[in-house]
Image (cartoon, coloured by chain):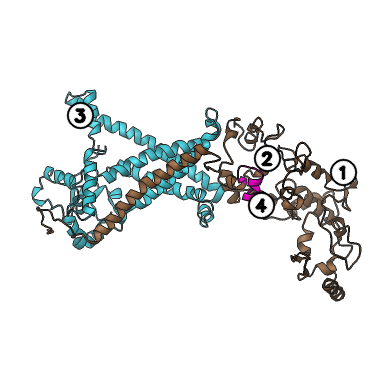
């Protein structure tokens, strides 16, 4: 396993470790696949649009673009299978083996560990959404103190998780229609087409508006969030989005005295942010040891 | 009177100009009809253009047919208004295999036995006879569209191919004509997109679809399938209307209703449409039950309709709340320090 510092300090600024190299590699693969799939799929969905033939021609037109689409879909499918293995491996190494070492390996303890895993939806997500709405509606000046993964990140993970299941399964039905209709009636292809194309529009809008806004275009991270490349999250974003987890990490690192107040992100956004976003870049960050 | 004076003027000027007459123009019709402005308003107030583009006509499949072949009522120049062309007229050319005068009567017989016949199975005239297509509803005077693979992607006659013809045939005029005659039949005269557009003239006309109870706008629904979309993106290999609605090896004019047991689109035969060697050889009859012409509306395909509604609701139900939060977030960031009730711990001060 790679060894990482939880906090890196570079030029007096703190960066918090968030994503491992293998997680970042998976994210970049899925992002590339999804972008290629959207660019080669949408001209078919919106075939009457003026831009459709031009965008399709960019990927080789009707002879090549469908092959590119299937290739990207296949990579996505393999990635999903890898991810399932990765989840299984993580459960064994990070949950089952520690429980075994502590001699607490029972079905109940494993289920408890799974349910309380940071990526699993919890009651705190509901209260966080309510608190966030209060903040948005000027009822409070405090953002909810987020955990390691906020409800937005859990949504960003679980929505594509099930989205991929739908997209890959319906894609296979349409691609391998001769094989699939050996067992299923032909009109299954009609349903597959509806699900594939409509879910694709939902996924594309979700990712390119909601996800991109949260991780790139929001004033706190504009013009681009770098955590998906470096694996490290800047302190002002930790304070803004993950305050509860931020306090835990700082205390664990023995830096209680340096914990910023919860509204520090507002000050950072208005005063310090321009300087910070200029300084942060991949090359400025220390190499992952 | 105007037309006669125009013809007289044409006759005069034609004497001054070099003759551009073609072998088929023995009657010297182009003497007048070669002028782009030759036109008139007919008895119904409709603008009629009588100009014949010599270059286009000479590259058309009817280039060897004399003008009087299709317009037998015209016997003298200047002439009275011509009757409508009857495509079943015997032409002034000899069909080489039978050495008989050629006509399209066989095509008419095929058409009469097809779903596009003017009478129904019992011999009674169909309602709305004007909606039933005749030759000219689907066909113009088509241009030769020779195979292009000898010239890679460039259309036109290949010198390489002509060289092969010249081994036996000495007359270039003969070679040119028969090369075109043969090659143009080795593939589709129109690309799939154009075929669909021809059928769409009637089959996407909502009034025609309604009064003949056709159940679907056939070309619209075809356009929603991968085949239709690929045709739109100019794929030449993709199946069009004729590939599925006509039994392989038969005249496209013999298109039968899906209710006819001899039709390839009949429920018992449909499986053979997809399972041809060039398409989906391992397809089962089940695959052909894919609803190619589903419009996903409530009347025609309720299950698909509600399945689609589910996804619309899912999309709206997911994105609208998220977009709402996004705009609230943007708005909140405009006024980061504004609040109705400040919390006691920070008292609104930022450190």
Distance from the alpha carbon under mark 1 to that under mark 3: 89 Å
Asked if residue A57 is among those painted magenta in the image, a careful observer would answer: no
Q: Which mark is residue B201?
A: 4
Q: Position of residue A237 (x, y in %)?
A: 22, 52
Q: Colour of chain A?
A: cyan
Q: Position of residue B150 (x, y in %)?
A: 70, 50
Camera-side residue: B320 or A115? B320
Residue that appears at 21% across and 41% down: A124
Residue marked by disc 3: A98
Let me know if marks 1 and 4 both belong to one chain: yes
Q: Position of residue A136 (x, y in %)?
A: 24, 54
Q: Colour of chain B?
A: brown
Of the numbered discs 1 and 4, the one sitting upstream in the chain is 1
Tell which tag, 4 or 3, sits nearer the viewer: 4
Q: Which mark is residue B97?
A: 1
Residue marked by disc 2: B245
- Chain identity of mark 2: B
Let me know if marks 4 and 2 both belong to one chain: yes
Q: Position of residue B280 (x, y in %)?
A: 60, 35
- Chain identity of mark 1: B
Distance from the alpha carbon under mark 1 to that under mark 4: 36 Å
Of the numbered discs 4 and 2, the one sitting upstream in the chain is 4
Whether label 3 touches label 2, CB < 8 Å: no
SS assignment at label 3:
helix
Distance from the alpha carbon under mark 4 to that under mark 3: 72 Å
Distance from the alpha carbon under mark 1 to that under mark 2: 29 Å
Whether label 1 touches label 2, CB < 8 Å: no
Above-or-below relation of A210 to A100: below
Whether label 4 touches label 3, CB < 8 Å: no
Q: Residue furthest left?
A: A257
């Amino acid at each position: 396993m790679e060894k990482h510092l939880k906090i890196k300090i570079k030029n007096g600024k703190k960066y918090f470790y968030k994503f491992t190299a293998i997680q970042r590699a998976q994210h970049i693969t899925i992002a590339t696949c999804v972008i290629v799939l959207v660019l080669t799929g949408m001209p078919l969905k919106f075939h009457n649009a003026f831009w459709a033939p031009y965008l399709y021609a960019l990927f080789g037109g009707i002879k090549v673009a469908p092959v590119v689409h299937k290739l990207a879909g296949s990579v996505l499918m393999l990635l999903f299978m890898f991810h399932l293995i990765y989840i299984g491996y993580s459960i064994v190494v990070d949950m089952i083996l520690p429980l075994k070492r502590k001699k607490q390996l029972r079905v109940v303890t494993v289920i408890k560990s799974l349910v309380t895993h940071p990526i699993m939806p919890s009651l705190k997500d509901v209260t966080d959404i309510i608190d966030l709405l209060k903040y948005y509606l000027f009822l409070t000046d405090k953002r909810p103190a987020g955990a390691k993964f906020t409800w937005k990140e859990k949504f960003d993970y679980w929505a594509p998780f099930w989205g991929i299941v739908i997209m890959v399964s319906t894609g296979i039905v349409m691609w391998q229609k001769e094989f699939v209709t050996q067992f299923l009636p032909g009109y299954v292809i009609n349903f597959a087409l509806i699900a594939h194309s409509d879910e694709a529009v939902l996924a594309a809008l979700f990712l390119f508006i909601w996800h991109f806004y949260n991780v790139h275009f929001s004033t706190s991270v504009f013009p681009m969030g770098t955590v998906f490349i470096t694996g490290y999250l800047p302190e002002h974003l930790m304070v803004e989005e993950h305050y509860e987890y931020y306090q835990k990490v700082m205390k664990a690192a023995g830096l209680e005295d340096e914990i910023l107040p919860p509204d520090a992100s507002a000050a950072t956004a208005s005063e310090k942010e321009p300087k910070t976003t200029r300084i942060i870049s991949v090359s400025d960050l220390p190499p992952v040891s | 009177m105007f037309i006669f004076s125009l013809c007289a003027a044409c006759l005069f000027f034609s004497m001054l100009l070099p003759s551009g007459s073609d072998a088929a123009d023995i009657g010297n019709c182009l003497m007048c009809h070669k002028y782009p402005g030759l036109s008139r308003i007919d008895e119904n107030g409709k603008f009629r253009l009588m100009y014949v583009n010599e270059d286009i006509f000479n590259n058309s499949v009817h280039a060897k047919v004399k003008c009087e072949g299709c317009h037998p009522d015209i016997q003298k120049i200047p002439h009275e208004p011509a009757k409508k062309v009857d495509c079943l007229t015997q032409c002034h050319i000899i069909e080489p295999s039978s050495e008989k005068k050629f006509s399209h009567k066989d095509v008419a017989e095929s058409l009469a036995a097809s779903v596009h016949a003017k009478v129904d199975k019992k011999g009674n005239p169909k309602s709305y006879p004007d909606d039933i297509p005749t030759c000219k509803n689907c066909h113009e005077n088509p241009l030769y569209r020779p195979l292009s693979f000898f010239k890679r992607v460039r259309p036109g006659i290949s010198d390489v191919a002509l060289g092969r013809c010249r081994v036996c045939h000495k007359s270039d005029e003969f070679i040119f004509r028969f090369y075109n005659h043969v090659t143009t039949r080795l593939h589709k005269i129109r690309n799939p997109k154009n075929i669909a557009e021809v059928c769409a003239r009637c089959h996407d006309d909502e009034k025609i679809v309604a009064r003949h109870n056709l159940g679907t706008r056939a070309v619209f629904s075809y356009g929603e399938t991968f085949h239709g979309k690929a045709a739109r993106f100019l794929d030449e290999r993709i199946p069009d209307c004729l590939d599925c609605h006509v039994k392989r090896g038969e005249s496209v004019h013999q298109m039968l209703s899906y209710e006819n047991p001899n039709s390839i689109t009949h429920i018992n035969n449909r499986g053979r449409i997809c399972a041809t060697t060039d398409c989906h050889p391992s397809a089962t009859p089940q695959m052909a039950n894919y609803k190619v012409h589903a419009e996903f509306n409530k009347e025609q395909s309720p299950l698909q309709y509600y399945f689609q509604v589910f996804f619309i609701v899912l999309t709206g139900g997911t994105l609208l709340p998220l977009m709402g939060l996004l705009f609230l977030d943007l708005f909140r960031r405009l006024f980061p320090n504004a609040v109705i009730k400040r919390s006691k711990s920070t008292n609104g001060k930022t450190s």
